[in-house]
């Protein structure tokens, strides 16, 4: 990262006015585990005390080590997150607990406060002490140093923060949910039918289905919700800049296929990307293979559009997490070696379209091409159901530095040679936008003359 503060690629969840809130929060985090496998935490309150359980690793490891599910309480918040290379993991686990004379609270966040480093430096100069590097701790200290009621403190703090982020804040008796004005990071709220008056919150709508949640809706950009004993409140913070829309990579890679963002289903979007990719195809092949799991739907749609057989040519070890979101290069390479295998009886002697959701560093694509070559594939045409990723994200999605990105380092022809493919083709930005059909933040795709023109016109696309 280019700043001494962590951006969080994570998932957050919460419950309010729900019996056994900690256990239900754990269920929601199970539904978000794909967003981070390196750290997890849950805070719960029974109206009298705040308790917090955190540890490295998967949610299942926390549940084995701590009595989370038996912890009494009617409100809870939690987070799953990944570890970044410079991450001192223990200090950055969430929830962040604040114990102040004005009252105690816990907070979880996801996304990125773009001016977090400057805010942090300003508060350190005032004598505030930070334990870690998370944005949640920055939010907590901003709220702490403000005066007035908690709602006023939160709104004043939010007006100082730039970027795209969401957070859940819980006291002994209230819960606040907030989505930034920019809106590239999403947060959902729903009713819990088994608990009249109960509310559930999650980064993705798909996770809420685990509880049978009803009336699921996405918080609007700039929306702040407050839930307390017998009272609710809703406010919209005024926008001082454009709303970016949801992160495009949520549709490409991050989100569950059953999630919906800004009214656009993730599964439907991935199928549309595959069809759009096929409509520009000039090569031929014997079959289409998708990279498990997030490219499967795009690959199947690509095959149907071209009327070419879709085959299972790669198998995935289900017990290995995503290599895209591993913190170090060594861990990514080790994970890749055991994550996928090619099926030689399917690909030997065949010309193959290999469809993947995206290329970040290029190492995964190179390894998959190597696997297919070793399994006997005659030709490999790599097709990517997203535009070139050519700049690092500043809106809260885990990404490599720009100098590490394949799209920033090489042309398609150079990339073809690097990964030992016979051809490489990406969706263009225009094709992607038409297929998605809604406004979305595509800053990570934004290189070249088109972006310069957009910047000159003062708009973000």
Image (spheres, rainbow, N blue to C red):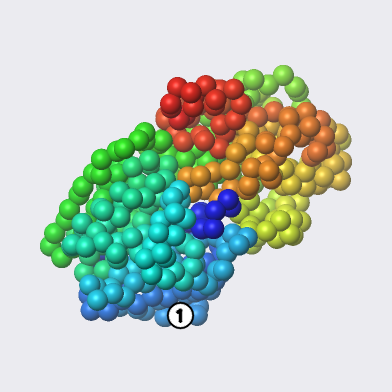
- Foreground: 432 or 381? 432
Could one spot residue 142 in this view of the protein? yes
- At 55% from the left and 25% from the top, the residue drawn is 452
Of all residues, the one furthest to the left in this rendering is 230
Q: Where is residue 447 in the image (x, y as percent from the top left)?
A: 60, 30
Q: Position of residue 36 (x, y in %)?
A: 53, 59
Q: Where is residue 267 in the image (x, y as percent from the top left)?
A: 49, 39
Q: Where is residue 270 in the image (x, y as percent from the top left)?
A: 53, 35
User: Which of the 4 image quarters holds residue 119?
Assistant: bottom left
- Compared across the picture, whether 26 is left or right of 231 comes to right
- At 52% from the left and 21% from the top, the residue drawn is 453
- Compared across the picture, whether 86 is left or right of 111 comes to right
Per the image, label 1 sits on a secondary structure element best described as loop
According to the image, label 1 marks what residue? 66
Q: In this view, does 362 lie above or below 318?
A: above
- At 49% from the left and 27% from the top, the residue drawn is 455
Could one spot residue 206 in this view of the protein? no
- Foreground: 406 or 205? 406
- At 18% from the left and 62% from the top, the residue drawn is 148
> Badge 1: how crowded within 10 Å, few (<14), some, or many (20+)?
few
Q: In this view, does 396 lie above or below 211?
A: above
Question: How many discs appear?
Answer: 1
Q: In this view, does 21 lie above or below 372?
A: below
């Amino acid at each position: 990262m280019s700043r001494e503060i962590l951006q969080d690629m994570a998932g957050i969840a919460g419950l309010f006015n729900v019996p056994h809130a900690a256990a239900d929060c754990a269920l929601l985090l199970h539904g978000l585990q794909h967003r981070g496998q390196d750290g997890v935490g849950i805070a719960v309150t029974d109206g009298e005390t705040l308790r917090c359980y955190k540890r490295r690793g998967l949610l299942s490891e926390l549940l084995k080590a701590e009595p989370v599910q038996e912890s009494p309480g009617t409100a809870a918040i939690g987070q799953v997150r990944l570890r970044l290379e410079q991450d001192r993991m223990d200090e950055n686990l969430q929830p962040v607990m604040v114990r102040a004379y004005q009252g105690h609270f816990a907070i979880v966040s996801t996304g990125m406060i773009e001016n977090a480093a400057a805010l942090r430096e300003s508060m350190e100069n005032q004598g505030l002490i930070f334990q870690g590097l998370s944005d949640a701790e920055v939010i907590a200290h901003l709220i702490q140093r403000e005066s007035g009621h908690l709602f006023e403190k939160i709104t004043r703090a939010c007006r100082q923060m730039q970027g795209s982020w969401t957070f859940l804040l819980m006291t002994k008796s209230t819960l606040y949910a907030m989505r930034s004005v920019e809106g590239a990071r999403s947060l959902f709220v729903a009713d819990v039918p088994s608990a009249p008056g109960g509310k559930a919150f999650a980064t993705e709508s798909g996770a809420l289905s685990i509880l049978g949640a009803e009336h699921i809706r996405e918080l609007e950009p700039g929306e702040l919700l407050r839930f307390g004993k017998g009272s609710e409140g809703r406010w919209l913070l005024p926008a001082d800049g454009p709303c970016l829309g949801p992160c495009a990579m949520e549709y490409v890679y991050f989100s569950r296929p059953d999630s919906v963002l800004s009214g656009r289903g993730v599964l439907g979007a991935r199928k549309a990307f595959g069809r759009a990719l096929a409509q520009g195809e000039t090569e031929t092949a014997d079959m289409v293979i998708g990279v498990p799991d997030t490219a499967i739907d795009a690959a199947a749609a690509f095959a149907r559009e071209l009327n070419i057989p879709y085959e299972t040519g790669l198998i995935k070890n289900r017990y290995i997490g995503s290599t895209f979101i591993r913190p170090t290069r060594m861990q990514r390479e080790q994970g890749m070696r055991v994550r996928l295998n090619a099926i030689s009886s399917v690909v030997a002697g065949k010309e193959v379209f290999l469809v993947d959701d995206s290329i970040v560093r290029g190492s995964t694509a190179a390894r998959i091409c190597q696997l297919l070559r070793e399994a006997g594939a005659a030709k490999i045409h790599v097709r990517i159901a997203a535009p070139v990723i050519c700049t690092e994200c500043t809106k809260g999605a885990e990404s490599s530095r720009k100098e590490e990105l394949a799209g920033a380092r090489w042309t398609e022809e150079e990339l073809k040679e690097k990964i030992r493919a016979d051809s490489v083709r990406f969706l263009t930005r225009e094709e992607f936008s038409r297929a998605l059909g809604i406004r979305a933040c595509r800053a990570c795709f934004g290189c070249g003359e088109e972006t310069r023109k957009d910047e000159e016109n003062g708009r973000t696309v």
